[in-house]
Amino acid sequence: MNRLAVRLVLSHVLVAVIGAAATYVIVREIAPPFFDENMRTSGMGAAGHGQGQAAGTFRTEFVDAVNQALIIGALVGAVAAALFGVFAARRVIRPLGTVRAATRQMARGRYDVPVPVPHETELAELATDVNTLGRGLADTEARRVRLLGEVGHEMRTPLTVIDGYVEGMIDGVLPSTPEQLGNVSEEVRRLRRLSEDLSMLSRAEEGRLGLSRQQVDVASVVRAAAERLRPQAEDSGLSLVVDVGAEELSALADPDRLARVVTNLVGNAIRATGPGGELHVACRREGDVAVVEVTDNGEGLEEGELERVFERFYRVPGRRVGEHDTGSGIGLTIARGIVREHGGDLTASSAGAGHGATFIARLPLAG
């Protein structure tokens, strides 16, 4: 009784039975009075005793015939309703079975199983949603696998360097000088940064960054974070303009996390802009919100990439990768998570490929 197909068939039969029962009761109650009225109108009701007896017999036979016809009609209707219910149930259950089979395949890790789209609007929407889910899961899985490969590659390089230095020192080929140990320490710090990025990504997506909030001037934090990257921008042949105004923008926020957001945004802008390009970092008040803008005139973004760049592990196709660029695609995901945990949001806009991009962070101000 809990199966949808059985319920659909029973619902058709129940409708037919209710309709037949209603028809039977109505005809049973209305047909005899109508018959008597017609008999009186024709004069047969006022005839002699013999004719009256004949009329009564005829009335009884008429009522019995009507009852039999109604019963037969009800049975035929119930059978027809059951057959039609079976047909309708199969048309509904078949697409649902296909969707169920596809979701089971997705649960086993096969995301490329297409679900045929039926003609019924509601079932077609369900099949389309499942197909969209499959494509999304396949894309996420592909990016996850790519991230694992990239993380493994990024870890392999410093580990190889560390192993080489340590073996050289053990064999006496390399002296254990502060300079050599400093090289080992630099590679260890590189591994630690990668580990911290992955850990922060996890915390950002779970909404548990553990912010250390205090009264800070957003403009000062933005200026300091941007200026720290000025040497990197100038080494890349870029012009960096920082305009945060003179107004103090006080907010209850974590200064280190905000600086991380600005660092990620400016660092991405540097990588996306070729030599001779310009970067603009601005900070201003809009009502009770502090607006931080990082604009470049570099590679730009297509319309479909404006939201995808914030997805974890996503990299813009064709984007050049610098010598020290990890290419993991988690910086913007972390930055948006930090801004949102502060009660704001981080969005992107662009006029298209080759026309630069602007990233805008909005943070609520104190009071």
Image (cartoon, helix red, strand yellow):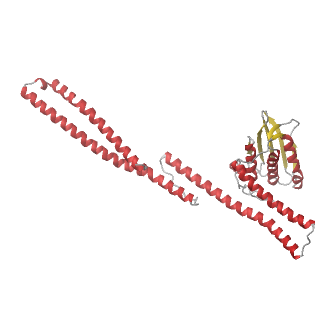
Give the left or right position of residue 2, taking residue 76 as reference: right
Q: Is residue 307 visible?
A: no
Residue 109: % across, % down: 59, 60
> Is 192 located above or below residue 363 in the figure?
below
Give the left or right position of residue 271, taking residue 95 as reference: right
Residue 94: % across, % down: 45, 53
Q: Going 24% across and 30% down the picture, which residue do you hit?
A: 29
Q: Going 15% across and 34% down the picture, which residue do you hit?
A: 60
Q: Is residue 90 visible?
A: yes
Q: Going 13% across and 33% down the picture, which residue do you hit?
A: 58
Residue 261: % across, % down: 79, 47
Q: Nearer the viewer, residue 273 or 210?
A: 210
Q: Which corner quadrant holds the C terminus?
A: top right
Residue 96: % across, % down: 48, 52
Q: How many marks?
A: 0
Give the left or right position of residue 290, taking residue 135 as reference: right
Q: Nearer the viewer, residue 226 or 316?
A: 226
Image quarter of residue 316: bottom right
